[in-house]
Amino acid sequence: MTVSAVDRLYLRSAIRLAEKGLFSVTTNNPRVGCLLVKSGHIIGQGWHREDGGPHAEIDALRNTIEDPRGSTAYISLEPCCWEGRTPACTTALIAAGIARTVIAARDPHPRVAGGGVRALLDAGIEVTEENLSEETDALNPGLLMRGENNRPFVRLKTAISIDGRTAMANGQSRWITGEESRADVQYWRARSAAIITGVGTVIADDPKLNVRDQRFGNAKPLRVVVDTRGRTPRDAALFGEKGRIAIACAKGVESINRAEMWEQQGGPAIDLAMLLETLSDQGCNEVLVEAGATLNASFLGQGLWDEMIVYMAPRLMGDRARPLAALGFTGMDEAISTTVKSIDTLGPDLRIVLTP
């Protein structure tokens, strides 16, 4: 059966429901919305509300206003067909007597990847698929990245002057950008499962790296400090905030305050690819890197990034100020090319989103 204009309207409503989990579903699970329609009326709706909680289909079935038998389920992502922390959604849809499902995109997770569709078809449920993956991928970029590359979706965030500087030579950087830009950072922190920074930034700026804006609920991303030798101050502001803290360090580094010590074998520098794999294994879908020139250069130089958010302020800081990334290039053939995804004005600043 082909997808009708009405089907697309309901599917996009399901995607809007999925957006409600943007700041509460950050690890392991995708953000999903589900709409139940019977005889032209919406009888139930739901979304994945929190990590480890009931999936969108279960949530919708629990919130129906009448018997869902014979109804159509509009789902932003193919339903799961295996039992993890919650029962399989295909089992629940079959038991509820759903007659038809319309899905916006298939789930790339290896344990699903078409298995949900097959389970529904085998049970006699009609399945209609529409390709709205561009919209669903924007909600769940980490789902694809973890499935294909075993690492989270990595965003780099930086604030610069119009001459590309991130701090004065003495390390002073407060504040390059205006209040609107700093408020916008809260959004990106809140949707991230983890925030990565370097020990140099911790020592120089003493950031909390927390989510202060109450509009984003109780988001508490894991905060990870790349600190090979264990130089993170025990009284760093990070420790004054609730939530997990991890320090990626060399083997044998002494414990620091309440941080989890993630030891790595090998050379003098932290293997960032290995660190990202560890974060993926912990279920982190999206991570935000808020670091200085050295760590930024490592992520950029190794190609371990998927999006860069640059807040550019209309000021000049001079050639002695610190750069965005200490890449040390000497020829144009070494330059890293990027694609401009969007440019927006935030107060006096520009927010430029770049992709590789």
Image: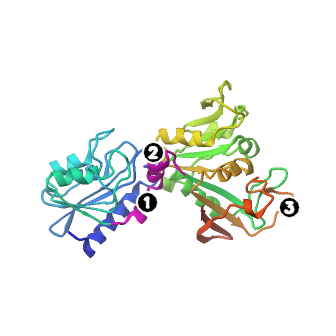
Numbered circle sitting on residue 137:
1
Pointer 1 and pointer 2: residues touching (CB < 8 Å)?
no
Closest to the observer, 342 or 69:
342
Q: Which residue is mark 2?
A: 27
The residue lying at 69 percent from left, 36 percent from top is: 227
Question: Which of the 4 image quarters holds residue 166?
Answer: bottom right
Closer to us: mark 3 or mark 1?
1
Numbered circle sitting on residue 314:
none
Q: Earlier in the sequence, mark 1 or mark 2?
A: 2
Q: Colour scheme of this structure image?
A: rainbow
Q: What separation in Å lies between label 3 and label 2 (alpha carbons)?
A: 41 Å
Q: Within the magenta stretch, is there residue 166? A: no
- Give the tally of numbered discs: 3
Q: Is residue 44 left or right of residue 19?
A: left
Q: Within the magenta stretch, is there residue 135? A: yes
Question: Mark 2 belongs to which amino acid?
Answer: Thr
Q: Which residue is mark 3?
A: 319
* Segment colored magenta: 131-153
Considering every residue shown, the one lying at the far bottom of the view is 5
Under circle 2, the secondary element is loop
Q: What separation in Å lies between label 1 and label 2 (alpha carbons)?
A: 16 Å
Q: Is residue 111 left or right of residue 212?
A: left
Q: Earlier in the sequence, mark 3 or mark 1?
A: 1
Q: Which percent across, then down, holds residue 62?
A: 23, 50
Most frequent secondary structure within the magenta stretch: helix
Question: Mark 1 belongs to which amino acid?
Answer: Asp
Question: Which of the 4 image quarters holds residue 344?
Answer: bottom right
The residue lying at 42 percent from left, 44 percent from top is: 28
Q: Earlier in the sequence, mark 3 or mark 2?
A: 2
Closest to the observer, 103 or 201:
103
Closer to us: mark 1 or mark 2?
1
